[in-house]
Image (cartoon, grey):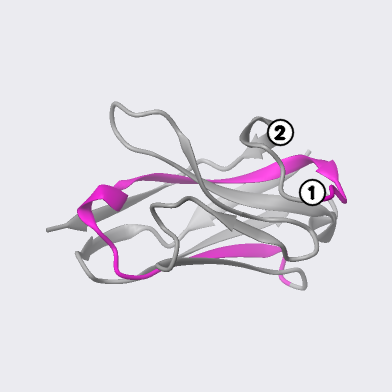
Amino acid sequence: QVQLVESGGGLVQAGGSLRLSCAASGRTFSRYAMGWFRQAPGKDRELVSAINWNGRTTYADSVKGRFTISRDNAKNTVYLQMNSLKPQDTAVYYCASDSLALRNGVPPSTDFGSWGQGTQVTVSS
């Protein structure tokens, strides 16, 4: 069972930047895709970005060009660099891990089986 711990959330003004981190433990990190999701009040949880085990990435249209996902397998950590933040980016951000090792491509949202506790990101206008 993998354990995921997010950090890096906070309050930032519109146009600012934050970097989220997610530290993983409990299994071989490098073999699994990782994703960042977010959930705003009253809305469904949505996939923001994902990176598979060999570095292929995907982004939601709403964050393309502003957010960058990356991973450091030596540190068992996945990052989400968020630039040009907007008030509509306000949400709880969750890190998640794929349930299948060495998957070809990026997993569908429903295949992320392990979750962190979430970190709050608030963007003020």
Residue range of the region highlighted in magenta in the rendering: 75-104
**Residue most extreme to the left:** 125
Q: How packed is label 2: few (under 14 Cα within 10 Å), some, or many (20 or more)?
A: few
Residue at horizontal 47%, vertical 58%? 7
Q: Does the stretch in magenta take in 91?
A: yes
The amino acid sitting under disc 1 is Gly
The residue located at (21%, 53%) in the rendering is 87
Is 125 on the left or on the right of 119, as rendered?
Answer: left
Image location (x, y in percent) of residue 6: 52, 53
Instruction: Residue 37: give its label.
Output: none
User: Marks 1 and 2, Cα distance to the nearest angstrom?
Assistant: 18 Å
Picture residue at 44% right of the left edge, 52% below the top: 61
Residue placed farthest to the front in the image?
61
Locate residue 75, reporting x and y percent. Answer: 71, 70
Left or right? Give the position of 4 relative to 74.
left
Secondary element under disc 1, as helix, strand or loop, is loop
Q: Name the front one of labels 1 and 2.
A: 2
Question: Mark 1 packing: few (<14 Cα in 10 Å), some, or many (20+)?
Answer: few
Q: Is residue 82 magenta?
A: yes
Give the residue type that dot 2 points to.
Asp
Q: Is residue 66 above or below residue 123?
A: below
Q: Is residue 98 left or right of residue 9?
A: right
Q: Which residue is mark 2?
A: 111
Which residue is labeled 1 in the image?
26
Taking 6 as reference, is 27 left or right? Answer: right
* Helix, strand or loop at mark 2: helix
Q: Earlier in the sequence, mark 1 or mark 2?
A: 1
Instruction: Point out the image quarter for the N terminus.
Output: top right
Question: In the rendering, at what x and y percent does residue 27 appear?
Answer: 83, 50
Q: Position of residue 43 (x, y in %)?
A: 34, 29
